[in-house]
Image (cartoon, coloured by chain):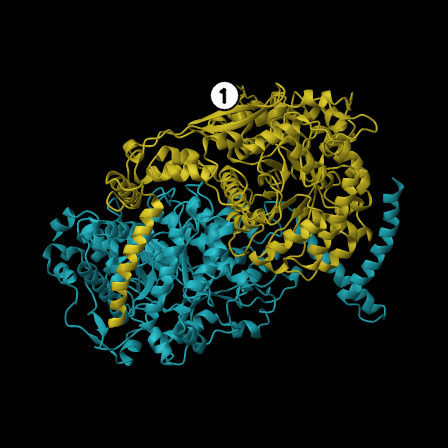
Chain colours: A yellow, B cyan
C-alpha cells in the first residue's frame, strides 16, 4: 500500500494528511458565534453567524449595539462543536427529510458502468474516499425534485430551512428598530416580499423562478436557493486540470471558498481521477456542487470530441448524479445552425463545453445528443433532483462579440429547453456571459427573463473590458454587480488569474470577496429587505471609532485589520478616536460630533429658555432664515464687482 | 549641512538620493515605444505609447498586426531620451506658449507672505527644491484662463495638444480598417464627436463642459482635458499626514501613479513641510496637480478651525497658485443651513474640508469666507489659471446617507457657484460622492448635469457598499465605472487602504489599475470612438495564443506575465497553443479554429464544385434548413413521451 501510494504523486496526500483541513479554513471568525435558528421540527437548524459588537464609546452616546446576524456559507467548518475529518466527510443534514418523503430507494449497486469499473479497479483503492454512501434513486415513476413537491403544494423541510436562512432574522431586526434605515430599492420588476416565508419559497420554486439545487445523494447539503427574489448568490469554481493540482488542494479550495462566501461550488476538473476527486469534494461539501459532465465524458473518449456518444454521456450523468452532484451544466443549446455564426467572431467559441459540442455537431453534421436526448436527460435529473444549469456554449469571449446572433440565438433555444425541463418539473437555471460592455448588460438580462420565463440567470461576470488580464475579478465584478441588480440570481466568480493560469488559494479568496461585494451591492440596489443592516452597523462602528467592530463586520476582517495595523500597529490605536489617514487634528468624524452637540445644544437652550420644544426642523428653519439674511448681504458683494 | 540633514529625518532623503527616481518608475513598458505625434508647430509634440505586436501564427492566418497606440500618462519618466533628475525637475513644455500670449509677467518676488517667510527661513534650506521657478502672474486686468481664450475664439497650443492626444490617431486606425468593429455606445445625451478636433476642444472649454487644468506656473505640464465628451480620466491621491511618509515617498508615488495611469494627482498632504513637499511634487509633475488649500491653511492656525480667516486662506491660495497648483478643491458650498441636516446621519460629515468649514460656520454663526469671498477667489484663479474643483463637503460617508437633503442642497449651491465662476471665465469642475448604492448613482449624475450646466463631474467612487473595508477600490470601482458611463468626467481613485490606513506603492498601483478599468469600461459603454481598439487587439492576441501581446496590451503587463508564469513558467509556454486552465485537449480556441476551417471548407467545396460562391450566409441558411428538418424529427421525440 505504501509503495503504491508513493508511486502516485498527487492524490496520495489525501491519505497521508491528518484528519483536519487546513487551520485557516476552520478558524472561527473574530467576535463571531455560530448560531442555529430553529425551524418547525427539531432537525431544521439554520446556521447563521452572529457578530458581537462593542458598546458605543461614552463620548458618542454610550449605547449598547445589538449583535449583527449575517448569512453564513462557511458550514460545519467554522462550528467549534463539529469535529472535522475530511476522510469521513461532513455530518448528514437531510437524509431523514429525504427518507420521510418515501419516494426514493437505496440501490444495492451503482447504476453507472463507469462507476462500477472504477470501484472494481484495485489500483485506485488508495485514491478512494472510504465512506462512500450507497446511491439513492427515485422509486420507479417517482419525481423527487423540489419543483415537483412545490407544484404539488408541499413545503419541504428544505424550503422551510431556506425561508429562515433568507429571512435572516428580519423579525428580530424589526423589533430592535434597526430595519427602518434602508433605501427603497429599484428591482426592475422583481417581486421581493417584505418577509421570506416557507410558502413564498414554495411558490417561487413551483413557478420556476427559483431553484433549490439539492441532489438526494448529497444529504450533507445545507439548503440554499437561487432566484431573483432572493439574496444574490455567488459560485466559486475549483477543479484540477491535466497540468496541475491535487485532490487535497481541491478540497482545500472548497472549504476556503465557502469560508469567504461561495454559495455553491463548481468542480470543473478535467485532469486525472475526476471521479475520485469529486467523491472527496461532495462528501466534504455543505454547499451545492455543480459540474460540467461533458468534461468527464470527453476524458472517457480520450479527448476526441467526435467520439462522444449519448451512451457515454448518459452513463456519466448517472455516475455523477449518484455521487450527489446538485446541478449539471448542459450545453444543449449549441445548435448546428448557430455554429457558423461564430466563425467571424474575434474569439469564436470560448466555452469549453460549447466548443466540444460545436465540434461534435460539425463532425456529425447533426444536432448534438444533448439536444436530441434532452427529455432523456430530464428523466435522469428528476430521478435524483439534479438541477439544470443550461450552459451558454456560445457566450462571447470578447467585448467585440457581445450580444451577437450566435449568443442570442442560443439563449432563445435555452428558453425552449427551459419549458421542456419544466414540463418534467426539473429545476432549471440558465447560464449567461461572458464579456459584455456595460451598456449591453441589461439587454442580456431582459432577454433572458423574457425568453426563459424568469428562470434564474447565472452569469460569468460579465467582464466589462478585455484590457486588464490579471485584474479580471475587477473587470467582471463591475458587470456582475450590475447584472445582479438587474435581476441575475447567481454570479459565477472570476479570479485574478482568469485567462492566465490556475487560481491558488489567495486568488480564490480575492475572487470570492469581489463577488460578495458585487452580490451585496446588487442586494442593496434591489432593496432586499434587511440588506442594508450590515452596512449601517459597519458605518456606525466606523463613525464611532469602534475599529474592531469595523473589521469584524467586514467581509474580510483579517485583511482590514492587517491594513490598519500597517500604519498604526499598536492596540491602543484600535480605540483611538482618529486614524492614520488624517491624524488627530483633521478628523471629520470628531468635528461631526461637535456638529451634533451643537444641534443638541440649540435644542437644549431653547428648551431651557422656556420656549416650545425646538426640533431639528425648527433649528433648520431658523438657520435657513439666518442664512437667507446673510445671503442677502452676501449677494450684494456679488453685485458690487 | 550634513549634521542638519541627519537631524531631519524624512526630507533629507531627497538630498541624499541619487539623481534618479526609483528604477521601477522609469523602466519603459515592454514592447512599447514612446512616440510623439506632431502638431501644427514644432513644439507641440504629443506623447503616445505604441505597443508592437507579433505576427499572427501561420496556423491562424499569419497576418501582420499593426501596432496599437495607447494614451500615455507616464510622461518623460518612460522616455529613454530624457535624463530624469528629480533635483532639477522636468523639462519645460509650455513656457513658450504662455510667453507668446504676452498677458503674463514674471514677478520679482513671491506674492504670498507665507512663501517669503519660508524662503527666508535658513533652517528650511535643506528641504528646499533648488531650481524653483520665478512666479508668473497675469498682467493687471488680464484673464489668463483657457476658458477665457476659448471664449474669445482662440485655439491655444494646449487645446491643439489635447485634440491630438484625445483623438489617439484615429485617422491611422481608420486607414488600417480596425475601427469598424466597435459597439455603438449609449452616452446618455453626451455629445461625443467622431473625431476630436482643436476647434471642438475650444468649444467644449468655452461652454464650460470641459476644463484644461493648467496653471501658468506649471509649464512642465503635458496638457490634458476633463469633460464628459472626452476620455474618462482618473485622479490618484498622494500626500503625507502628521503620522507618516516623506517628501521622497510622495514624489515616488507621483511617478508610480502616473506610470500606471493617473491623469491628475492630488497632493493631500496635511503633515509637516507641506509647502516644500508641494514644490518637489510640482516641479516633477507632468500631470495636473490638485490640492485642498484649506488643509494647509488649517496647519497655519495650529489646527483650530475657528481661527481660520479669509486673509490666511487668501495668502494660501496665492502661495499655491504661484507654485503651480492646477486645481483647487474649494468647499464653498458648505452653507450654514445645510450643516444641521447632517446631524442625524449615520456618519455625519466625512469630508475633511467639509467638516473644517462646518465647524467654522457653527463657531462664527455665519457663512464661510469661501462662500462670501467667492468672487475674490475667482480673481485669484483667473490670474494664474487655476481651475475650481468645487468640493462636496457634505458628501455621504455611508450608504445610509446617500442622496440626502444635505448632499443635494450643497450640490445646488455648487451649481450657483459654477455660474459665478463662469462669469469670470474660471474653469470649474464639481466634486461628487462618496457612498451611494447602485440604484441611486444615476440621480447624482443627472442632478449634477442639470444644476451645474454640464460642468465636469469629478467623483470619489462612489462606493456601492460599506461592508468591505480592505476592498474599497472594488466597492468603489463598481460605482466609478457606472457613473463614468452616465457622464462623470473624472474618477478619483480609492485604494484598498481606504478607511484603514495610508496607501503604500502597491496600494497606489492597485487603486490606479482598478480605476483605469472603470474609466475604460465607461469609455466603451459611452461608445467613445476608438475605445474598443485595444480590447479588440488584446482579444485577438488571446485567441491566437500570442501570449506576449496579450500581456503587453494589458493595463499591467508585469502582473499578467507573472500570473501566467506561476503555472507555466517556461518560455516555450508563451508560444504554446494552449494554456494552464484547460490543458492541450480542452482548448476551445483550437476548436474554434476548426469551426472556421469548416466554414471556409464549405465555401471552398462549393466554389470547386462549380456552384455559385457560397457565402457564410448561405452556409448558415443551408444549416438552418438541415437543422429545421432535424428538429422536425427531433420534435417527434418530444411528443412521444
Please, what secondary structure does the residue beneath circle 1 have?
loop
Identify the image quadrant of residue B59: bottom right
Quarter that holds the C terminus of chain B: top right
Q: Residue B358 location in percent, x, y? A: 28, 51
Direction from residue A351 to residue B224 in the image, left or right = left
Q: How many marks?
A: 1
Viewer-closest of A442 and A476: A442
Identify the image quadrant of residue B372: bottom left
Q: Is residue A515 visible?
A: yes
Question: Dot 1 surroundings within 10 Å: few (below 14), some, or many (20 or more)?
Answer: few
Direction from residue A408 to residue B395 in the image, left or right = left
Direction from residue A152 to residue A159 in the image, left or right = left
Q: Residue at x 48, y 36 (%)?
A: A179
Q: Residue at x 63, y 56 (%)?
A: A443
Viewer-closest of A4 and A567: A567
Using the image, name the chain to which the residue with label 1 belongs.
Answer: A
Q: Residue B163 location in percent, x, y? A: 44, 73
Q: Residue A470 location in percent, x, y? A: 50, 49
Q: Is residue B294 above or below residue A64?
A: below
Q: Is residue A312 visible?
A: no
Q: Is residue B32 above or below residue A34?
A: below
Q: Is residue B420 above or below residue A124?
A: below
Q: Is residue B442 above or below residue A425?
A: below
Q: Which residue is mark 1?
A: A80
Q: Residue B288 location in percent, x, y? A: 33, 64
Amino acid at each position: 500500500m505504501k509503495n503504491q501510494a508513493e508511486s502516485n504523486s498527487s492524490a496520495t496526500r489525501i491519505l497521508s494528511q491528518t484528519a483536519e483541513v487546513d487551520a485557516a479554513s476552520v478558524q472561527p471568525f473574530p467576535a463571531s458565534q455560530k448560531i442555529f435558528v430553529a425551524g418547525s421540527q427539531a432537525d431544521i437548524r439554520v446556521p447563521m453567524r452572529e457578530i458581537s459588537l462593542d458598546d458605543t464609546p461614552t463620548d458618542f452616546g454610550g449605547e449598547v449595539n445589538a449583535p449583527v446576524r449575517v448569512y453564513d456559507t462557511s458550514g460545519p467548518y467554522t462550528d467549534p462543536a463539529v469535529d472535522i475529518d475530511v476522510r469521513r466527510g461532513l455530518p448528514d443534514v437531510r437524509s431523514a427529510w429525504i427518507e420521510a418523503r418515501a419516494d426514493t430507494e437505496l440501490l444495492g449497486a451503482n447504476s453507472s458502468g463507469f462507476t462500477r469499473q472504477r470501484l472494481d479497479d484495485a489500483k485506485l483503492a488508495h485514491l478512494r474516499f472510504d465512506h462512500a454512501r450507497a446511491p439513492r434513486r427515485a422509486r420507479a415513476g417517482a419525481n423527487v425534485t423540489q419543483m415537483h413537491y412545490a407544484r404539488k403544494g408541499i413545503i419541504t423541510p428544505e424550503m422551510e430551512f431556506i425561508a429562515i436562512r433568507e429571512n435572516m432574522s428580519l423579525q428580530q431586526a424589526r423589533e430592535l428598530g434597526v430595519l427602518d434605515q434602508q433605501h427603497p430599492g429599484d428591482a426592475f420588476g422583481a417581486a421581493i416580499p417584505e418577509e421570506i416565508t416557507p410558502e413564498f419559497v414554495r411558490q417561487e420554486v413551483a413557478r420556476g423562478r427559483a431553484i433549490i439545487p439539492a441532489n438526494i445523494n448529497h444529504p450533507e447539503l445545507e439548503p440554499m436557493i437561487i432566484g431573483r427574489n432572493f439574496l444574490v448568490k455567488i459560485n466559486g469554481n475549483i477543479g484540477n486540470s491535466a497540468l496541475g493540482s491535487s485532490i487535497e488542494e481541491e478540497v482545500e479550495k472548497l472549504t476556503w471558498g465557502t469560508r469567504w462566501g461561495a454559495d455553491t461550488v463548481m468542480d470543473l476538473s478535467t485532469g486525472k481521477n475526476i471521479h475520485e476527486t469529486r467523491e472527496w469534494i461532495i462528501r466534504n461539501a455543505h454547499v451545492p456542487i455543480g459540474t460540467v459532465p461533458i468534461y468527464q465524458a470527453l476524458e472517457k473518449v480520450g479527448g476526441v470530441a467526435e467520439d462522444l456518444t449519448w451512451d457515454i454521456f448518459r452513463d456519466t450523468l448517472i455516475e455523477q448524479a449518484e455521487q450527489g452532484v446538485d446541478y449539471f451544466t448542459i450545453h444543449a443549446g449549441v445548435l448546428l445552425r448557430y455554429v457558423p455564426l461564430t466563425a467571424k467572431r474575434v474569439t469564436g467559441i470560448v466555452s469549453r463545453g460549447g466548443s466540444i459540442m460545436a465540434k461534435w455537431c460539425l463532425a456529425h453534421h447533426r444536432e448534438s445528443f444533448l439536444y436530441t436526448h434532452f427529455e432523456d436527460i430530464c428523466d435522469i435529473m428528476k430521478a435524483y433532483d439534479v438541477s439544470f444549469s443550461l450552459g451558454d456554449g456560445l457566450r462571447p469571449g470578447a467585448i467585440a462579440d457581445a450580444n451577437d446572433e450566435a449568443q442570442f440565438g442560443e439563449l432563445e433555444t435555452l428558453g425552449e429547453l427551459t419549458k421542456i425541463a419544466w414540463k418534467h418539473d426539473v429545476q432549471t437555471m440558465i447560464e449567461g456571459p461572458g464579456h459584455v460592455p456595460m451598456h449591453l448588460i441589461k439587454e442580456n438580462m431582459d432577454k433572458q427573463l423574457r425568453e426563459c420565463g424568469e428562470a434564474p440567470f447565472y452569469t460569468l461576470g460579465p467582464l466589462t473590458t478585455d484590457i486588464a488580464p490579471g485584474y479580471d475579478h475587477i473587470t467582471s465584478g463591475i458587470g456582475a454587480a450590475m447584472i445582479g441588480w438587474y435581476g441575475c440570481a447567481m454570479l459565477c466568480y472570476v479570479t485574478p488569474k482568469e485567462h492566465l493560469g490556475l487560481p491558488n488559494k489567495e486568488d480564490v479568496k480575492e475572487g470570492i470577496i469581489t463577488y460578495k461585494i458585487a452580490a451585496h451591492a446588487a442586494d442593496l440596489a434591489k432593496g432586499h429587505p434587511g440588506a442594508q443592516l450590515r452596512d449601517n452597523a459597519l458605518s456606525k462602528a466606523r463613525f464611532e471609532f469602534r475599529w474592531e467592530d469595523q473589521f469584524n463586520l467586514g467581509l474580510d476582517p483579517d485583511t482590514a485589520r492587517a491594513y490598519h495595523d500597517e500604519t498604526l500597529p499598536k492596540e491602543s490605536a484600535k480605540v483611538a478616536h482618529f486614524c492614520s489617514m488624517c491624524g488627530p487634528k483633521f478628523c471629520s468624524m470628531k468635528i461631526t460630533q461637535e456638529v451634533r452637540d451643537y444641534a443638541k445644544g440649540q435644542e437644549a437652550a431653547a428648551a431651557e429658555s422656556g420656549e416650545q420644544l425646538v426640533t431639528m426642523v425648527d433649528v433648520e428653519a431658523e438657520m435657513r432664515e439666518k442664512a437667507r439674511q446673510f445671503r442677502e448681504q452676501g449677494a450684494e458683494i456679488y453685485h458690487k464687482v
